[in-house]
Image (cartoon, rainbow, N blue to C red):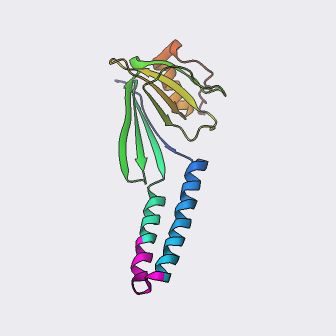
Amino acid sequence: MVYNKDVFIEELIRRRRAGKETAFKIGAVILGLVLVALAFHFFTSIFPFFFAIICILIFFMFKYTVKEYEYSFINGDLDIDMILGKRKRKNVLSCTAREIRLMEPCADRRVEGDFTAVLDASVNARSEGRWYFICERDDGGRILVYLNPSDRLLRAFKQVLGPRMKGEIPPEEKQA
């Protein structure tokens, strides 16, 4: 019997709204109400058209501000995709375990260093179980990545990264 030792893990993380995003949505609704009132007052004959357009714009704004991240870990290769509005998918990072220099849990301190890019693919900046890693590309680029991995994904990272991964990982639960 041949056993397959391939590791394949996929996780979907939904980004929680930050205060800035909530304020933007509230401002858009207030602006929409003001525009509807102005359209009713000055353009009574074409008011239904303005009302429909503003409602559609607000609907799509709310729909496409839902942001999710999907982590795909396959034999040491990590792909992070951003999913907008549960429809549009965009790959934002692909890296191998060889490119990850350090991975550890986020503390209350800021990560210092010179980075060419910062990717926050975590639930939010204050979420529990938030980790970061530094990815160093062959072209000299350094990327700081924040994520919220599950215990299973952390164990897979530990298996591949070894001593480059710091921090405590919960032990695997035994099934009866």
Query: Which of 1/29 is in front?
Result: 29
- The relative height of residue 46 versus residue 122 in the rendered view (above or below) is below
Q: Left of 67 or right of it: where is 125?
A: right
Residue occupying image coordinates x 65% and y 25%: 109
Q: Left of 12 or right of it: where is 75?
A: left
As drawn, the residue found furthest toward the top would be 163
Chain part drawn in magenta? 42-53
- The relative height of residue 89 versus residue 78 in the rendered view (above or below) is below
Q: Position of residue 107 (x, y in %)?
A: 65, 26
Q: Left of 148 or right of it: where is 74?
A: left
- The relative height of residue 161 versus residue 154 in the rendered view (above or below) is above
Q: Position of residue 167 (x, y in %)?
A: 61, 20
- Image quarter where the N terminus lies is top left
Secondary structure mainly formed by the magenta segment: helix
Q: Left of 109 or right of it: where is 35?
A: left
Query: Which of 68/50 is in front?
Result: 50
Query: Which of 13/101 is in front?
Result: 101
Q: Position of residue 22 (x, y in %)?
A: 58, 54
